[in-house]
Amino acid sequence: MQKFIPLLTKRSFPSPRVLSHCRNLCAIPSEAENDDLQNQVLVEGRATSRTAVLNRPASLNVLNTSMGARLKKLYESWEENPDIGFVVMKGSGRAFCAGGDVVTLYRLLNEGKVEECKDFFRTLYKFIYVLGTYLKPHVAILDGITMGGGAGVSVPGTFRVATDKTVFATPETHIGFHPDAGASFYLSHLPGYLGEYLALTGEKLNGVEMIACGLATHYSLNARLGLIEERLGKVITDDPSVIESSLDQYGDLAYPDKRSVLHRIEIIDKCFGHETIEEIIDSLEGEAARSHDECCISALKKLKEASPLSLKVSLRSIREGRYQNLDQCLVREYRMSLHGISKRISGDFCEGVRARLVDKDFTPKWDPPSLGQVSKDMVDGFFSPLSEFDPELKLPTTLREAFI
C-alpha cells in the first residue's frame, strides 16, 4: 500500500499572548433565549482544560449561527486565559457534527431572509479561522458522523481522534453547493487527487481511512473514548507533545479494508487528476469498462447524481486551494457561498436541499441540467468579487498568526 503523507505538519506554539478582539453585539437576547443558545454548546471544565460539547443530538449537532458565535466567543476567552492549557471539542449523541444547518438556511432563503444566511457563513468561517490559528493545543473527538462543516470545525485543529464509529464525507455537490468551511484547503492537501475524489463524489471515509490519509491524527475504538477523556482530564499542560503522548496511550492500530478506496489511490490519481469534470468522467468510464472496478462504478454514479454546476465550481475550488493558505481559502469560499445562495447564477442550493433533506424525493431538477450547459461565465461568477453591498469576509490576519 502506498505510504500516505500527513495532512498537516506540526505547528510551533509560541508563548501565550493577550489578543485584542472587537466584539460587536447587535442585540441582547432574553434570558430564555440565552439559556437555549448556551445549551446548544455546552462547556465541561477541568483544572487546566475546557471541553466544548456540540449539543443538538436530535439534528446530528448541525451548526447554526448562534453556535458559531458562541464557539468563537468561548475559544477566544479560553485562549486569553493563562490557566487553560488546551481545549477539546466533541459532540453529543451519535454524531460529532453533520455540518451546517442547511435546512434552516433553505427556509430563511425562501422567507427572503438572505442577510441571516450571510451572517451564518460569516460567523462560522470566522470561528474556523480562530481554530486554524489557535495558540493552544486542540483535540477534536470525531466520534460518529463528521461531515461538511463538522470537518471544518475540527480538521484545522492540532489533533483529531477518529473512531470505529466515525463517518466522514463532504457531500455538498449533492445539495447544489460546494465543499466549504475550509474544505478547499484541507482536501487539496490530501495525498494525490484524493481531495478531488472526496469533494466531487461525496463518498464516505471511515475512521481508519481518515487516519491513513491524514485527516485524523489518532484512531481509537469508541469503547475506549471514556479512558481518553479521563486521561485528558488529568493532564496539566499546554505542551502539544504531552497531549499527543496521552492520546497515543489509548490509540489502536488499524489498517484500511482491502476494498477501501485508499488501496486504489493510483486509479484515483489517474482519473481525478484531469483538468475538467468531463475528462474525469471519461477516464472513470474507461477504467470501469476495463476493470469493472467498484470504486470507479460508484464514483460515476455519484457524479451523475450531483449538480453539474456544483461539480465544476468545486473542482476549481479544490485546485485553487492547493496554492492558498487557510485564510485565503475561507475568504474565497465565503464569496462562493454568497454567490451560491443568491440564486443569481442558479437555484441549485435550494433545489438540492429541498430534494434531499426537505421533501426527500431525491429528484433534484438541476439548473443547468447537464455539464455541457454549464458555461465558463457561470463558474467564473462564483469566484467573482462581491458587490459593494456585500463586503468581503474580513479575517484578523494582522492580529493572528497562521501556523498552518
Image (cartoon, rainbow, N blue to C red):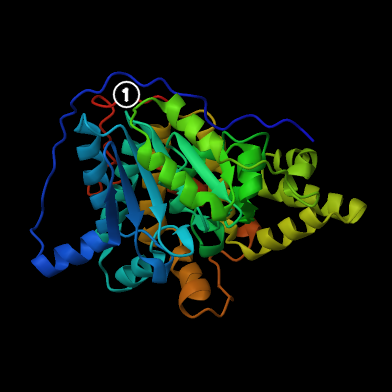
Quadrant, the N terminus: top right
* 18 vs 363: above or below: above
Taking depth in this image into account, of 392 and 359 the one nearest to the observer is 359
Q: Residues within 10 Å of mark 1 (few under 14, many from 20)?
A: few
Q: Where is residue 269 drawn, in percent x and y?
A: 74, 38
Residue 383 placement (x, y as % from top left) = 44, 43
Give the side of residue 371 with respect to residue 225, left or right. Answer: right
- Amino acid identity at mark 1: Glu
Q: Name the spot of residue 217 as percent of width and height, x first.
A: 55, 37
Residue 4 lies, with reference to residue 368, above or below; the image says above
The residue wearing badge 1 is 401
Q: Would you place residue 365 above or below residue 18 in this image?
A: below
Q: Is residue 251 left or right of residue 111?
A: right
Q: In the image shown, does 248 or 40 lie closer to the viewer?
A: 248
Secondary structure type for disc 1: loop
Q: Residue at x 56, y 39 (%)?
A: 218
Write down the quadrant of residue 118 in the picture. bottom left
Number of callouts:
1
